[in-house]
Amino acid sequence: MNNIQTEKFVHPAKARIQIIISALILLGNLSIPINAQDRDNLRIMSFNLRYGTAEDGENSWRFRKENVVAVIKESKPDLIGFQEALNFQNEELLKMMPEYSCAGAGRDDGRSAGEFSSVFYRKDRIEVDTIKTFWFSDTPEIPGSKNWGNNITRICTWIHARDKLTGESFYHFNLHLDHESQYSRERSALLVIKKIQEKKEPVILTGDFNCGEENNAIKSILSGGMKDCYRLRNSKRENEGTFNSFKGETGGDRIDFVFISDGLDAEKSEIIRRNFEGKYPSDHFPVTAVIGFRK
């Protein structure tokens, strides 16, 4: 059975009723006194999983998927932007983490074939009414399309959602840019910014951008109005690399990001370098951010 949602639209009136009911239930179940601002914040994660059919020996998916889940459960994100997730990986993670739902589409056919840039969201906190995927090409609505010099098809999945606790609405875009073609990265960054700027509510953007913050693709994201959560909360230093080669390496560029638009603030952001007796959950470190809606 396929539990992954590829396209969705819910009538706004019905969504508002669902939000009110869910918020009342959620508030009624909060028995532990916590700071109201902390409670209202959303926890975000961007995590390149490494595709599950790669022949990585002792780092193959079957040997590390429990560690992936352990890292996620420790961070307790409300929203996760995965990259390189194949359909069976999404399905296995849903079985191991039933508190989440999955939104996304395979990059090869717009359904289940190829890698996803899937968005996982906590069902008790997030209500999703729209799910869309587009392709980084001159024809972004055509599944499998590519013509910007990238040999591999590249996509972005986005959702429109409401926070059941605060009632705030927002968008979450999640992407994976090309690892070879700089032209593709630059054109892709311009396209995603164009689509973000069309939105009237706050936007979260997660992804593996396959380039560092000095790259023109990232500069386009920033000049387009997005803010880098990690850099907002952390001064620049050595060893900020997020691609670790399953070895814990930190010397490369920081290529995995969480960005936010106006209307959102970053309270905290970090690179998670958790390992299990020297074994890393993926060849990328996940990046997290705690964000709040600006009052």
Image: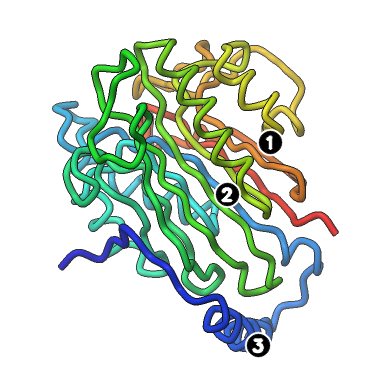
Q: Is residue 192 left or right of residue 89?
A: right
Q: Is residue 272 left or right of residue 180?
A: right
Secondary structure beneath dot 3 equals: helix
Classed neighbour count for the residue bearing mark 3: other residues with Cα under 10 Å, few (<14), some (14–19), many (≥20): few
Q: Kindly report the distance in space between the C-alpha atoms of the residues bearing marks 2 and 1.
A: 10 Å
The residue that mark 3 highlights is 24
Question: How is colour applied across the structure in the image?
Answer: rainbow
Secondary structure beneath dot 2 equals: strand
Quarter of the image where the N terminus is located: bottom left
The residue that mark 1 highlights is 229
The answer to which of 94 and 57 lies nearer the viewer is: 94
> Can you give x and y, in whole percent of width and height, for residue 245 in the image?
35, 19
Q: Kindly report the distance in space between the C-alpha atoms of the residues bearing marks 3 and 1.
A: 31 Å
Quadrant of the rendered image containing residue 36: bottom right
Would residue 281 be seen by someone viewing this image from the given angle? no
Q: Is residue 122 left or right of residue 61?
A: right
Closer to the chain start, of discs 2 and 3, is 3
> On screen, 135 above or below 106?
above
Q: Which residue is located at x 45 percent, y 19 percent?
A: 185
Q: Which numbered tag is attached to residue 44?
A: 2
Q: Are marks 2 and 1 in contact (CB under 8 Å)?
A: yes
Classed neighbour count for the residue bearing mark 2: other residues with Cα under 10 Å, few (<14), some (14–19), many (≥20): many
Which amino acid is tagged 2?
A: Ile
Q: Kindly report the distance in space between the C-alpha atoms of the residues bearing marks 2 and 3.
A: 23 Å
Q: Which residue is located at x 39 percent, y 35 percent?
A: 48
Q: Which residue is located at x 51 percent, y 17 percent?
A: 250
Q: Which numbered tag is attached to residue 166?
A: none
Q: Which residue is located at x 85 percent, y 59 percent?
A: 295
Which amino acid is tagged 1?
A: Cys
Quadrant of the rendered image containing residue 115: top left
